[in-house]
Image (cartoon, helix red, strand yellow):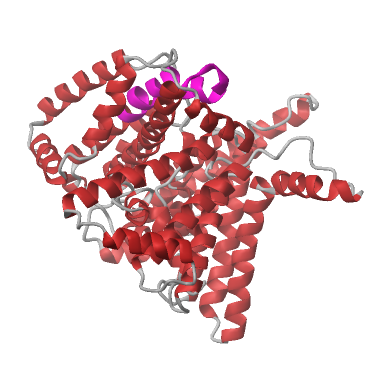
Amino acid sequence: MLFPTIRFALFFAVVMPASWILMPLPGGRRQMAADQDQPWLIPASLLALAAVLGPLAPWSSPTAVVVLGWVAALGLGGLAIVRWLDLTGLVRWNVFMLVASYVFYGAYDWHFVMVLAGSTVANQLLTTRLHRSDDERTRRLLLVAGVAANLGVLGWFKYKGFFLESASSIFAPLGWEITPPASALLPPVGISFFTFQALSYVIDTYRRRIEPSPLLDFAVYLSFFPHLVAGPIVRAAEFLPQLREPRDARRVDTGLAFWLIAAGLFKKVVVSSYLADAIVDPVFRLPVQHQAADTLLGIYGYAIQIYCDFSGYTDMAIGLALLLGFRFPQNFDAPYTAVTLQDFWRRWHMTLSRWLRDYLYIPMGGSQRGPRRAYLNLFLTMLIGGLWHGAAWTFVVWGALHGGYLAFERWWKSESTGGLEPLVRLRAWQAARPPVSPARRAWMGRLITFHVVCLGWVFFRAPTFKEAVSVLTRLTAIGTGTGVNLVVVATIVVFLASQFVPTDAVGRAQARFSLLAPWQQGLALAGFILVTNALSPTGVAPFIYFAF
């Protein structure tokens, strides 16, 4: 049940009104304080036991065992309802949202719920102990334990097969036998995202920037379904304060929410899906059957496809969260208008970029230990960021490419030569040329940055390094090929051009939409959805970032 699907639409149609019905009115602070003392753990635990003892009772067992399982489930479920009626205010809302989020996640694979729940409880226990400790050595040990535990779980599910296969290929010539698993473990969907959020909770508590929240609040934060499986990466300091205050449905900007959901739906269902079917998948599936022109279109097409796919998801996630009363940080800001690669990472997956900066680059020393250490830190940060995206050498190459180019950009703008004589001469030659106008320099920067990013996307998209090289070598096969058609070219050109539409113009259009009467907004959205459905291909592929 991962959107956009009819099942998710039905799920959200139940969750959203129920959420607002259960939301206490703002201003009841005395009642809110009392809510924190309610034994919410009892109904939540009973519901969990009912789920295990009832629907999951093994049908291959004797009839008596199955019957007892369902009787126990019904009894515990009834007791949970009775306890539910004792809850009030935000606690009741939190329990409801926690159950709804776990139902959403468990609908994909109920086994993954155990990983999410285990991560929640373990991080809460460790963070609470970390906050209460005043001994700096103990606090550092707890921090290391928390980071190691989170990365260990992530590594076990996501990287075990990759590292064993790599070790096997390295040590096989030496006669050392390392048997990789027959097939890699299927990682829980979105494990990278909720692990990074848990890490921010632990690290910010260690830094004394936040205090641990009640377990229920933290559980809702980590499992909140709009951003659970593919971001954006919302930090505890951004989410938890919103969770502690009642929200007013009358103050929700529904116009903005529906605008974001509609825009995200169009980008994913129409643009991304069309380019995938029309040019990207054929080029990357069989590179040898394509010439230079359609191969280049396939690479450009993937740049647009992955942007529409991922930004479409986050637009919908931000819009859905807004309908529930939460504001999420922006995640994309016209990234293909970037004039440098550093500017690109200020605009692309902004929540991940800031996370890598604050929890990896700066703790490694950032630029405080001299320029050479700064170059190394940039390279290592992006290398790790590449590996975060997937357990394959193609992602390592993608991260190394971005890290290396970011370091080069930093060097190029600095005064230090670092002894790199060829680059020094290149910079001297560039300085001796006639001055270039700022506008022309900006467009040259955009052109170079876009093609560096597209080069990286080849390795990001290709299943293996060999296939990525095969795609790149086809750029030398002069010809147009069969993949070139006006619709593909127009789609790529129009969407690249749309990146340069001024932000304030989009804001004015959205504001005008928000001012329409509800029935007018409804008619406009209905018409837009009909057009989207008519233009969309049959079936919608899963979001690309679900794999991460």
Asked whether residue 340 is in view, the answer is yes
Residue 513 or 48: which is nearer the viewer? 513
Q: Quadrant of residue 306?
A: top left
Is 108 displayed left or right of 293 in the figure?
A: right
Residue 335 in percent (x, y) is at 31, 45
- Which of 305 and 105 lies nearest the eye of the viewer? 305
In reply to whether residue 91 is colored magenta, the answer given is: no
Q: Residue at x 27, y 47 (%)?
A: 444
The extreme right residue here reads: 175
Is 77 drawn above or below residue 494 in the view shown? below
Q: Which region of the structure is painted magenta? A: 266-291
Q: Residue at x 27, y 65 (%)?
A: 29
Question: In this rendering, is residue 63 above or below 331?
Answer: above
Q: Using the image as rendered, state which of residue 462 and residue 109 is in the foreground.
A: 462
Give above or below for 332 relative to 14.
below
Judge whether residue 272 is colored magenta: yes
| Picture coordinates of residue 263, whole percent (x, y) | 26, 32
**Along the horizontal axis of the image, is 397 left or right of 334?**
right
Query: Residue 359 at what x, y percent from top left?
Result: 48, 66
The vertical placement of 512 against 40, above or below, is above
> Would you say 53 lies left or right of 234 here?
right
Residue occupying image coordinates x 55% and y 32%: 108
Report the predominant secondary structure element of the magenta stretch.
helix
